[in-house]
Image: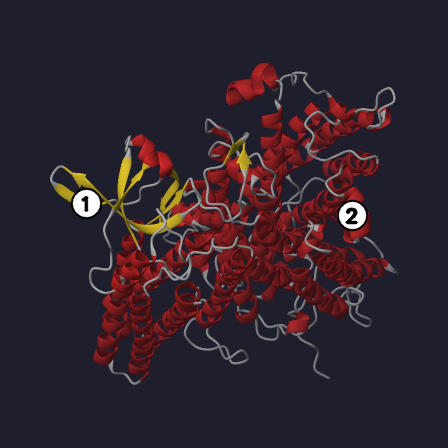
């Protein structure tokens, strides 16, 4: 019976979809939140791939400094000229790749994928809305993002090359480095910030205004709560970076000295500037965004994992309300922890102590979230799909990332670990095996809603197990390297600082582990091939789903036709239940959709 | 497909979508300008002694502009109230005044900018500094120099400049080149700000100049933040004026199609307009007076 209704529905959808709007309005300049979500998804996955490739080039250089890259080397030499002569990555190009890897991964890949792509596609469906509150603003948001991406990408090909000064772009270095790379970076960032601002306004307004009748705040799926808090972080934390970006742009283009101190020398000569600026100001403004940004990266992933675990364990989330309160507290406190990135700037012990205290406090709601998710597994009868595996792996990986952050939050231990590979390992555990596993879970989970077909389970499992193993082989040794004193931005993998007769330095074992890590990174790249094949192959050849609700889920996005038509719901929808009514005692079947009315007694 | 609550308020929140949207947008704007104001405080507190260019703004003009914006804030509310009272012609008149005020503000501001671009500070190699104007001969015509800096001197191969110094001000008292006698100082003070407020031009050799800069963003952190903040504010004024003009010129059509929708739009545009005025209310004292 399910099958029959489904085909009817899909047929009807098709007729509707073609209603007097052409190809351009339907797929390119669309105001439909689902199309925009997919546009964000495709763009950000492409940049995820690019960011990963940059990292591979860097890993080669770290493991084998001064040796040409096989196969890709000549291509790089062709594109970048002198800085990649003979396919060898120079220190300048290494810096460029480092800066752009960070920038692309954070601003062009993970945030747009987690927040914008999944948020756009899933949130209006989950709250029972026909679209976002401001569909045209939504479209403007995507196009501002896209132009920002184009500018950022174009900066690779200008004569002076792209930005070189890290994703944090600290002044004065970022300002005084010759070339226009930084200018492109700033212009692109201002576009990206504008985009996320429009998106954030839209998300908040949508969640507040367009919830279906009966969708009270505590019937909201946790994913929507996570997106709601994320949107507030973007709304309020991003503008100060826009301020900082405008000021650095002024420094770069009009020769002001916002971030350039008095008496600055560049290349041995006094700089022709007024001076009087403050390098510390940039760091404050940057990290005021930079820290909430960490939660912008992680919260959508936690939201997805929550949805998927509830669905896979077939039981309600343990402590749903605690999680909601925790995520609200987390969002609030994330605004007052930023200077723990700046213990080494000499801003003063009193300030350090304050931010150390708030940093410890913010670990409490994080632990509440993770604990609730672990407890949710208790007594569940798990259905092991690929998305379940990724969601489960998210928990310990995020746990490792979080716990290894504590020594960085205390200023006495941070002084030793700051700017070392330990930091790299720590935050990558949060965002790579953490957030990105969450995002993979989301892709596998919602793929049938978007395409009408499931992704292949076998390929999915190969992808999962290889990724899990190699992720850990990449990042676990970095903790040891960092504690051995290896600094994070060296283009030769620390060879310059190697221990030699009677001179203290990096031990041979520390430097040799570079090679092992790089091999694991290349293997990790190979492990993504099954995913890429699966992703494209399944669009046409994947197993067709026989119901609109293939995972037997309670939330509203599965109560729409597949894929949902413009306007989403076929008839007005009303909500009667909480988000995770799985295995309700006395109820036939093990799940009750949110829009199923209570039986009248 | 219709989005719910575009004109009617949602019962449990009491808001229509755009009203919530504009308040959220304004919240982010508060953070944007808030970061600028914080930067202002940090830069000012950290400025080297004598480096915070102070007292160089034209206070009467600034005050005038402040009242222009306050007036426009009043008329934009009246425009909205007129729509609520179904008085379209009053709405139109109020909107015309609002937009005229916006444009007036921008015109005055651009004259202020131009004035700064031909006002200079020169740092001498002997450590003295002074502010004033530079004139040069272009054929038979005497012209004000605009936007010169140290590089201009070498690029144009100028050996000396005719510099008309200002009177000493509270920002850098008594810094004069060449050092003046008491009588000269008195003379300058007496004539400053009263008609012919410049005393005679002095000739300065380019070789004696350490640095020359008009009052442009690169002059000092004060002018950097002054120009950045006022320009960003000016862009907001311009953006607001464009949106309000749209409501004015397309207003009749919108009014006939859906009066409530136009009223709401004017309310939302008005909220933005008040915010833009409010930013100026903070900018004026910190840039002109304090």
Q: Quadrant of the C terminus of chain B?
A: bottom left
Residue A125 in view in this figure:
no
What percent of the width, then of the height, locates residue B62?
A: 33, 67
Q: Label 1's element?
A: strand
Relative to B161, is A320 on the left or the right? Answer: right
Which of discs 1 and 2 lies nearer the camera? The answer is: 1
> Residue at left 52%, top 62%?
B31
Q: Please name the residue that numbered disc 1 is placed on.
A: B143
Residue A396 picture location, percent across and down = 82, 49
Does label 2 lie on the same chain as label 1? no
> Quadrant location of the N terminus of chain B?
bottom left
Taking A263 as reference, is A283 above or below it?
below
Q: Is residue B263 above or below residue A83?
A: below
The one nearer the camera, B148 or B98, is B148
Residue at (62, 22) in percent of width and height: A89
Estimate the x, y position of residue B175 in percent, counting from the top left.
40, 52
Gap in angstroms between the C-alphas marked 1 and 2: 60 Å
For disc 2, the neighbor class at 10 Å (few under 14, some 14 to 19, many from 20) is: many
Location of residue B39 with respect to B26 vertically, above or below: above
Q: What is the number of the mark on residue A333?
A: none
Q: Chain of mark 2?
A: A
């Amino acid at each position: 019976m399910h099958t029959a209704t489904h085909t009817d529905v899909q047929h009807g959808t098709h007729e509707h979809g073609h209603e007097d709007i052409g190809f351009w309005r339907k797929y390119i300049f669309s105001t439909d939140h689902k199309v925009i979500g997919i546009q964000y998804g495709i763009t950000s996955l492409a940049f995820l791939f690019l960011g990963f490739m940059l990292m591979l080039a860097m890993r080669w250089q770290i493991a084998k400094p001064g040796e040409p890259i096989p196969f890709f080397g000549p291509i790089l030499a062709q594109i970048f000229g002198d800085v990649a002569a003979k396919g060898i990555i120079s220190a300048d190009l290494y810096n460029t790749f480092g800066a752009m890897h960070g920038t692309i991964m954070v601003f062009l890949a993970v945030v747009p994928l987690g927040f914008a792509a999944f948020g756009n596609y899933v949130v209006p469906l989950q709250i029972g809305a026909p679209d976002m509150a401001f569909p045209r603003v939504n479209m403007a948001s995507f196009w501002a993002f896209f132009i920002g991406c184009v500018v950022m990408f174009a900066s690779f090909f200008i004569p002076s090359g792209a930005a070189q000064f890290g994703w944090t772009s600290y002044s004065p270095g970022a300002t005084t480095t010759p070339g226009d790379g930084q200018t492109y970076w700033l212009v692109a960032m201002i576009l990206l910030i504008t985009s996320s601002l429009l998106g954030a306004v839209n998300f908040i307004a949508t969640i507040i205004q367009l919830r279906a009748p009966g969708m009270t705040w505590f019937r909201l799926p946790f994913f929507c709560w996570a997106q709601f808090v994320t949107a507030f972080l973007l709304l309020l934390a991003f503008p100060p970076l826009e301020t900082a970006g405008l000021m650095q742009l002024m420094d770069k283009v009009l020769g002001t000295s916002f971030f350039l101190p008095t008496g600055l020398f560049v290349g041995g000569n006094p700089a022709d500037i007024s001076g009087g600026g403050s390098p510390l100001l940039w760091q404050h403004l940057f990290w005021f965004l930079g820290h909430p940004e960490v939660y912008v990266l992680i919260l959508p992933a936690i939201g997805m994992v929550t949805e998927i675990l509830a669905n896979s364990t077939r039981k309600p989330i343990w402590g749903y309300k605690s999680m909601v309160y925790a995520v609200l507290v987390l969002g609030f406190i994330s605004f007052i922890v930023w200077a723990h990135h700046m213990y080494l700037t000499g801003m003063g012990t009193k300030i350090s102590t304050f931010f150390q205290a708030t940093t410890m406090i913010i670990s409490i709601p994080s632990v509440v979230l993770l604990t609730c998710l672990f407890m949710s597994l208790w007594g569940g009868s798990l259905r092991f799909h690929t998305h379940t595996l990724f969601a489960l792996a998210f928990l310990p990986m995020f746990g490792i990332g979080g716990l290894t952050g504590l020594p960085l939050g205390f200023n006495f231990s941070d002084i030793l670990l700051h700017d070392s590979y330990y930091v790299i390992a720590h935050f990558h555990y949060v965002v790579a095996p953490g957030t990105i596993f969450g995002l993979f879970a989301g892709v596998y989970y919602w793929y049938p809603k978007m395409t009408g077909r499931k992704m292949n389970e076998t390929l999915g499992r190969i992808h999962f197990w290889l990724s899990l193993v190699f992720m850990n082989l990449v990042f676990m040794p970095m903790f040891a390297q960092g504690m051995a004193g290896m600094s994070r931005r060296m283009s030769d993998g620390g060879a310059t600082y190697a221990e030699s007769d009677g001179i203290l330095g990096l031990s041979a074992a520390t430097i040799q582990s570079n090679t092992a890590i790089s091999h694991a990174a290349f293997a990790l790249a190979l492990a993504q091939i099954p995913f890429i094949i699966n992703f494209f192959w399944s669009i046409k050849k994947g197993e067709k789903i026989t119901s609109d609700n293939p995972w037997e889920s309670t939330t509203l996005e599965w109560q729409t036709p597949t894929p949902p038509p413009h306007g989403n719901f076929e008839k007005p929808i009303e909500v009667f239940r909480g988000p995770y009514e799985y295995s309700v005692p006395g109820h036939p079947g093990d799940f009750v959709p949110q829009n199923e009315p209570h039986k009248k007694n | 497909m219709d989005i719910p609550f575009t004109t009617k308020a949602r019962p449990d929140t009491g808001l229509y979508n755009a009203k919530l949207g504009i308040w959220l947008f304004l919240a982010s704007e508060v953070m944007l300008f808030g970061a600028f104001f914080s930067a202002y405080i940090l830069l000012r507190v950290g400025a080297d002694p004598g480096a915070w260019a102070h007292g160089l703004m034209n206070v009467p003009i600034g005050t005038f502009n402040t009242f222009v914006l306050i007036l426009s804030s009043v008329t934009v509310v009246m425009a909205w109230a007129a729509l609520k009272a179904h008085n379209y012609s009053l709405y139109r008149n109020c909107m015309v005044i609002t937009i005229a005020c916006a444009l007036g503000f921008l015109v005055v501001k651009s004259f202020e900018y131009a004035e700064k671009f031909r006002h200079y500070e020169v740092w001498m190699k002997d450590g003295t500094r002074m502010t004033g104007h530079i004139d040069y001969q272009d054929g038979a015509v005497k012209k004000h120099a605009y936007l010169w800096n140290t590089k201009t001197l070498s690029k144009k191969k100028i050996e000396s400049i005719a510099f008309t110094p200002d009177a000493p001000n509270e920002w850098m008292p008594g810094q004069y080149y060449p050092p003046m006698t008491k009588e000269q100082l008195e003379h300058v003070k007496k004539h400053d700000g009263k008609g012919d407020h410049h005393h005679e031009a002095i000739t300065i050799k380019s070789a004696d100049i350490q640095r020359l800069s008009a009052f442009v963003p690169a002059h000092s952190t004060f002018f950097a933040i002054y120009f950045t903040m006022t320009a960003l504010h000016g862009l907001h004024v311009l953006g607001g004026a464009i949106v309000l003009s749209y409501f004015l010129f397309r207003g009749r059509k919108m009014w006939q199609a859906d009066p409530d929708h136009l009223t709401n739009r004017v309310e939302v545009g008005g909220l933005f307009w008040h915010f833009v005025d409010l930013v100026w209310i903070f900018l004026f004292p910190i840039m002109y007076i304090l």
